[in-house]
Amino acid sequence: MMIPKTKYEEYMAKEYVAVKPEDIPFYVDFRGLRSYAESQGKSVSSLTDEEKRRFVFSRS
């Protein structure tokens, strides 16, 4: 008796190519972002997009 594959098994069977860090065009300073959020008494998710953009830098 053959057991059909689950969606999870089908998903895991796909081949994916790893992305190299140098291929990502920007860098996010997560440590700085988290520290800033804590100093403001907020969670990172509650920060505005403008506040979050302060911690996104171009790799070039």
Image (cartoon, rainbow, N blue to C red):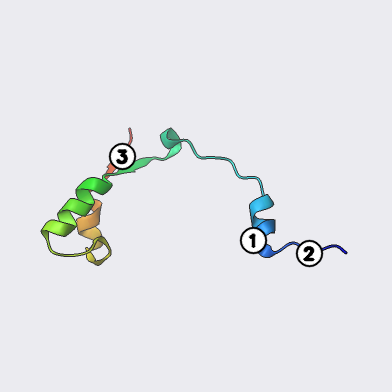
Q: Residues within 10 Å of mark 2 (few under 14, many from 20)?
A: few
Mark in front: 3 vs 2? 2
Q: Amino acid at mark 2?
A: Pro
- Which badge, 3 or 2, comes first in the chain's sequence? 2
Q: Residue at x 33, y 35 (%)?
A: 59
The residue where tag 1 is placed is 8
Q: Position of residue 17 (x, y in %)?
A: 58, 41
Q: What residue did someone put label 3 on?
A: 58
**Nearest the eye: 31 or 52:** 31
Say which mark, if any, is on residue 40. none
The residue at which mark 2 appears reads as: 4
Most foreground residue, 10 or 27: 10
- Per the image, label 2 sits on a secondary structure element best described as loop
The residue positioned 20% from the left and 47% from the top of the image is 32
Residue at position x 18%, y 58% from top?
A: 37
Q: Which amino acid, mark 3?
A: Ser
Q: Residues within 10 Å of mark 3 (few under 14, many from 20)?
A: few
Residue placed farthest to the right in the image? Answer: 1
Q: Is residue 5 left or right of residue 17?
A: right
Q: Secondary structure at mark 3?
A: strand
The correct choice, above or below, for 40 with respect to 14 in the image is: below
Q: Report the Cα–Cα distance between label 1 and label 2.
A: 11 Å
Query: Looking at the image, is mark 3 or mark 1 nearer the viewer?
Result: 1
Three-letter amino acid code of the residue under disc 1: Tyr
Q: Is residue 54 visible?
A: no
| Cβ–Cβ under 8 Å for marks 3 and 2 | no
* Image position of 41 (left or right of 20): left
Q: In the structure shown, which secondary structural element does the residue marked by tag 1 occupy?
A: helix
| Residue 58, position as x, y percentages in the image | 31, 39
